[in-house]
Image: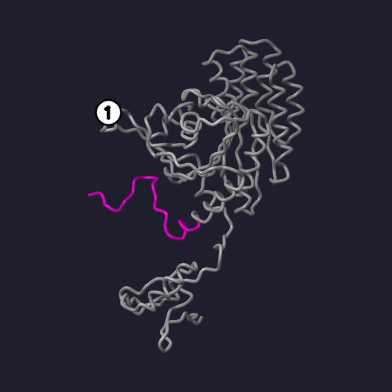
Amino acid sequence: MHPKWLLPEFVDDVLPREAKRVELIRRKILDLFVVHGYELVSPPLIEYLDSLLTGSGQELELQTFKLVDQMSGKTLGIRADVTPQIARLDAHLLDEQGVTRLCYADRVLRTRPAEGDMSREAVQLGAELFGCSTINADIEINRLMVRSIRSVVNRPLTIDLGSVSIARSVSDWLKLSVDQSNSFFEALQAKDRAALEEFCKDYGRDAQKVIMALPGLYGNPSVLDKARDVLINVPGADRGIDELYSVYQAIKDDVDYVILDLAELRGFQYHSGMVVSVYVEGETSPVARGGRYDHIGETFGRSRPATGFTIDLRRLTQCAIALPPERAQRKIWAPCLHDDFDLSEEINSLRQSGDIVVEDLLGEAIDIESKGYTHKIVKDGLSWSVVLLQN
C-alpha cells in the first residue's frame, strides 16, 4: 500500500524555517517593486488552456497540467508560467494607455521540474512593463531585476545578455520559412555547429560566413564589435546590437560579470528582442530570467510592447544572506489563562507591538529555550511582566 503521507515525485513541503525566509524576501522585493511604481496583481491558478498558452512555445505546453472543467466541459490548464496571464490582464482587463507596470508573486506548477530544480512547484516573483518600445523600458526592467537580487544576495552576480531580434534579422535576410527559421534557431541555441554546417549548404559564401559566425559571438562586450563587422550586411541587426550595448552600459556596474551571447535564443517562440539570465556565483541555474515579448498580447486583441522578468523565489532564498526581521522580535512563552483579563491584555499588547507570544495550552514543563524562546511572561505580585530567559 502507498503510504498516505508521501507526496508526488518532485513535490515537497516548505517547512517553517525556509517558509519564513521565503516570506521575508518576498515582502522585501515586492516593496522594492512598489516604490518603483509597479502595482501588485494576482491572476488565478487555473485558466482555459488556450488563454494560458497564448504566445508560448511547445515547451510551456508540455509543462502545463491539463484537466477538464466539470462545469463547462472545456479544457483547463494549471499555470506553469505567470507572464502570459499578466499580458492578458494588461490587454483585456486594464486596457490602459501609456506605460503600465505590474508585479506579482504567485505559485506555478509544472509537469516536470525545470532545469536545475528539485521541485515541480515554484514561486515566481516578477515585474512586467507594458506600453514602451524604447530601450528605456529594457534598461529599467533589467536594473530592477539586478537590484532586486542584490538586495538579498551578496555573492558575485553574472548577467547573460542575448537577443532574439538579431537572429530574427538574420532569418529574414536569409528569407527562411517558419519551419526553417525554427530549425535554425534551435541549432543556434544548442550551438550545434554540425547542424549549422548542414544548414549552410543551401546558401552562398556570405550567408555561410554569417551563419557559422553567430555561435562564436560569445564572451565579453568586445563581441559586439565583432558582431557589427560580421552582420554589417544584415538589415536590422545593428539595432539589436545597439540595444545590447545600451543595456550593458546601464547595468555593468551593478553586476560582477557580463556575458554577451548572440546565440542565446531561449524562448524564441515568444521573445521578440533581448533575453536575459542572471546567475549567482556557485549556482548552475539562473536565479532570474527576463526579456522582451512585444507580441504576446495579440491573441487578446491588444498587442503592446512588453518587457519583464521572473525570479525563482525559493532558489533566490537559498542564495540569500540571513535577513533580520524589521525589528528585533522577541519570542515569548506565556501561561494560558483565558479568564485572566490582565494577562490577556498584556498578551494582546505585546502582539500588537510585533512580539511573538505563544500560550502554553497544555501546561507542560518544556525546555522553552531549545524552542527558540527569548522571554516568558510571569506574575510579579498583582501584575504580569516579561522577563528575559537566562542563557
Residue 197 higher or lower than 88, as above or below: above
Residue pictured at 60% horizontal, 25% vertical = 188
Task: Identify the residue at the far bottom of this view.
Answer: 381
Residue where numbered disc 1 is placed:
73
Badge 1 density bin: few <14, some 14–19, many ≥20, Cα 10 Å: few
Residue sitting nearer the eye, 209 or 383:
383
Q: Is residue 277 left or right of residue 116?
A: right
Q: Is residue 189 left or right of residue 239?
A: left
**Residue 149 image point, x, y percent:** 60, 48
Residue pictured at 40% horizontal, 45% vertical = 10
**Residue 37 image point, x, y percent:** 59, 43
Q: Secondary structure at mark 1?
A: loop
Residue 108 higher or lower than 90, as above or below: below
Residue 140 higher or lower than 20, as above or below: above
The amino acid type, in three-letter code, at marker 1 is Gly
**Residue 250 image point, x, y percent:** 72, 39
Instruction: Please give the range of residues in magenta.
Output: 1-21
Residue pictured at 49% horizontal, 45% vertical = 105
Residue 292 in magenta?
A: no
Q: Which picture quadrant has residue 210?
A: top right
Residue 8 higher or lower than 48, as above or below: below
Residue sitting nearer the eye, 154 or 98:
98
Q: Is residue 202 left or right of residue 235?
A: left
